[in-house]
Amino acid sequence: MDALDRKILTELQLDGRLTVTELAARVKLSVSPCHRRLRDLEREGAIRGYRAVVDPAAVGLNFEALVFVTLRWEDADTVSAFEEGVAAVPHVLQAQRLFGDPDYLLRVATTDLAAFQQLYDQRLARLPGVQRLNSTLVMKHVVDDRPLPE
């Protein structure tokens, strides 16, 4: 991957709806080579897809929390069962496995505190292998959906 590929990626992260012609102009390439590079980036997996970024508040998801999860055991079966279970919870927007304690960090969005409490009690606390959950509420997003650095 060279500097021009990185510039293409940066421009698309800022505006994924650019036409190939617009993209080519922004990275100072003609359309054909830009299109070829774009298809190569897609084929190689550098570009995993295109999507709309939806404002959670616009769809009624006004409450966000970060949930730290510690598992009771960390054997392969427990980890796999937990990860499958958490992947099936639609309100979990992101889930990362961590080194150290806690074992996982979940980013969760719900309509309000009552909905979060219900999700916490009825879904998250019942996930396979969970020993402890610890939550903190998101006050505001300071950096959100920033493009990856070049």
Image (cartoon, rainbow, N blue to C red):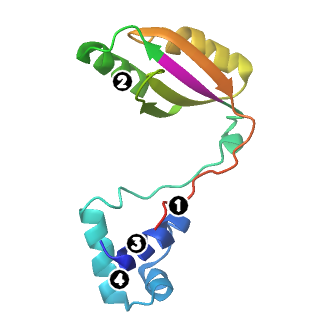
| Residue 91 circle label | none
> Residue 112 at what x, y percent from top left?
72, 25
Residue that label 2 marks: 83
Distance between the Cα atoms at labels 4 and 3?
12 Å
Q: Secondary structure at mark 3?
A: helix
Left or right: where 81 falls relative to 12:
left
Q: Nearer the viewer, mark 4 or mark 3?
A: 3
Residue that label 1 marks: 147
67 is within the stretch colored magenta: yes
Residue that label 4 marks: 34
Distance between the Cα atoms at labels 1 and 3?
11 Å
Mark 1, Cα crowd under 10 Å, few <14 / some 14-19 / many 20+, is few
Distance between the Cα atoms at labels 3 and 2?
32 Å
Mark 2, Cα crowd under 10 Å, few <14 / some 14-19 / many 20+, is some
Which residue type carries mark 2? Answer: Glu
Q: Secondary structure at mark 2?
A: helix
Mark 3, Cα crowd under 10 Å, few <14 / some 14-19 / many 20+, is some
Q: Secondary structure at mark 4?
A: helix
Q: Secondary structure at mark 1?
A: loop
Which residue type carries mark 4? Answer: Cys
Q: Which residues fall within the magenta stretch?
A: 65-69
Distance between the Cα atoms at labels 4 and 1?
20 Å
Judge whether residue 34 can be spotted in this image.
Answer: yes
